Image: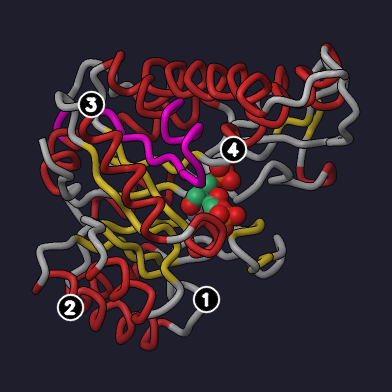
Amino acid sequence: MPLVTTTEMFKKAYDGGYAVGAFNVNNMEIVQGITEAAREQHAPLILQVSKGARAYANHTYLVKLVEAAVIECPDIPIALHLDHGPDFETCKSCIDGGFTSVMIDASSKPFAENIEITRKVVEYAHDHGVVVEAELGSLAGVEDEVNVSAEDSSYTRPEEVEEFVSKTGCDSLAIAIGTSHGAYKFTAAQCTRNEQGVLVPPPLRFDILEEVSRRLPGFPIVLHGSSSVPQEFVKMINENGGKMPDAVGIPEEQLRKAATLSVCKINIDSDLRLAMTGSIRKYFADHPDHFDPRQYLTPARANIKAIVTHKLIDVLGCAGKA
Ligand code: G3H
Ligand code: 13P
Ligand code: ZN
């Protein structure tokens, strides 16, 4: 089947109590690792591309890689989404250039300005059969060049969501309930430590999610910053020359719970980066004389497939739902 929008996926996910995984892609091995997992698990899939990915790999290369994946995976629905679109022009370029979904992220702007920018993107996107994700509230962490400190992040205010959605006409809404971008999501001071000495972050604000859902019945909610920073890969990186102390993510059980509620899309990027980097570091530690990229990228791609398979089955609950 051709690339799809997220409309049907989200309706089924909302009704079925699961979420669709949205994974960031930057090169062929990442696209292949993710899509092989989704094809095997018969899971719906969102492949997303950031501004940084477009700058790194080039729009056309990324679109063509995703089109190749669509040909290789004819039995699962795949959407191609712009992640954190910074402005109207970037969204327009992706809408004109084959994407089926865009995010306009004006969450750092004042409420009225966020509405105005989002509405402009929605009008253009809907005229071209493309759907729009918007954001209210702001997450801590690093996305593209923007680094939002924990003090500058803010939870979504549920009392604003109805006005925002009705005035913008957006198709899904990303909210801030305590998730955060990157592999260093929380400072040690924000966390407690478990018996293994691993940091345990503060719990997600399910009260905010529930209030948003009460005010927007049936409306798809999105969670960004939802990597869980598997300690197995942090260890693999640190045992093979890396230095990632206190990297910690969102506990998977909390994401699983969110997926059973109104959260229909969960964004995961850092976990795939950790899997890829850990695999490559280990490969070189084990084979210091090798230099063929196909050799060290093979276990990297296999570990991306393995972590995505785990997410589809155990976290998102979307395996078998295509
Ligand atoms: O939230 C952002 C995604 O992880 C993409 O990251 O901007 O480094 O491509 P990037
Ligand atoms: P992570 O950094 O937690 O993987 O979040 C990715 C994300 O939100 C992409 O938009
Ligand atoms: Zn994000």
Q: Which of 281 and 225 lies nearest the eye of the viewer?
A: 281
Q: Which mark is residue 124?
A: 2
Q: Nearer the viewer, mark 2 or mark 1?
A: 2
Amino acid type, label 4 = Pro
Q: Residues within 10 Å of mark 3 (few under 14, many from 20)?
A: some
Q: Which residue is mark 3?
A: 73
Residue 178 visible in the picture: no
Amino acid type, label 1 = Ser
Q: CA distance from mark 3 to mark 4?
A: 37 Å
User: Do callouts 3 and 1 mark residues in contact (Cβ within 8 Å)?
Assistant: no
Q: CA distance from mark 3 to mark 2?
A: 29 Å
Q: Which portion, as a residue range, is magenta?
A: 15-33
Q: Nearer the viewer, mark 3 or mark 4?
A: 3
Amino acid type, label 2 = Tyr
Q: Secondary structure at mark 1?
A: loop
Q: Which residue is mark 4?
A: 203
Q: CA distance from mark 3 to mark 1?
A: 37 Å
Q: Is residue 43 left or right of residue 185?
A: left
Q: Which residue is mark 1?
A: 108
Q: CA distance from mark 2 to mark 1?
A: 22 Å
Mark closer to the chain start, 3 or 4: 3
Q: Which mark is residue 274?
A: none
User: Do callouts 1 and 4 mark residues in contact (Cβ within 8 Å)?
Assistant: no
Query: Which residue is drawn at the image coordinates 79% and 33% (left, top)?
Result: 192
Q: Is residue 18 left or right of residue 308?
A: left
Q: Secondary structure at mark 3?
A: loop
Can residue 163 be found in the magenta stretch? no
